[in-house]
């Protein structure tokens, strides 16, 4: 999960002050949204 967070949201995390907790939360939220969108 660390690699996906750093690789997929690295620029976004930098803009957010490099907040690791926010990065993980944003990645999880994005994954859930993509999953729901794909299933629907």
Image (cartoon, helix red, strand yellow):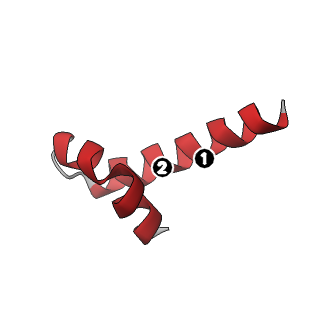
Q: Residue at x 83, y 37 (%)?
A: 39
Check disc 2: other Cα within 10 Å, few if <14, some if 14-19, many if 20+.
some
Q: Is residue 13 left or right of residue 7?
A: left
C-alpha separation, residue under disc 1 versus residue under disc 2: 6 Å
Q: Position of residue 23 (x, y in %)?
A: 36, 51
User: Disc 2 designates what residue?
Assistant: 27
Near-viewer residue (38 or 2) = 38
Q: Give the label on residue 31, or none.
A: 1
Helix, strand or loop at mark 2: helix
Helix, strand or loop at mark 1: helix
Check disc 1: other Cα within 10 Å, few if <14, some if 14-19, many if 20+.
few
Of the 4 image quadrants, the one containing the C terminus is top right
How many marks are shown on the rendered structure? 2
Near-viewer residue (18 or 40) = 40
Q: Is residue 6 left or right of residue 16?
A: right
Q: Is residue 34 left or right of residue 3?
A: right
Residue 6, placed above or below residue 9: below
Q: Are marks 1 and 2 in contact (CB under 8 Å)?
A: yes
Quarter where residue 10 is shown:
bottom left
Residue 14, placed above or below residue 36: below
Q: Residue furthest right?
A: 40
Q: Position of residue 18 (x, y in %)?
A: 20, 52
């Amino acid at each position: 999960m660390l690699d996906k967070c750093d690789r997929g949201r690295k620029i976004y995390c930098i803009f957010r002050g490099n907040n690791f907790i926010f990065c993980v939360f944003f990645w999880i939220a994005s994954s859930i949204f993509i999953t729901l969108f794909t299933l629907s």
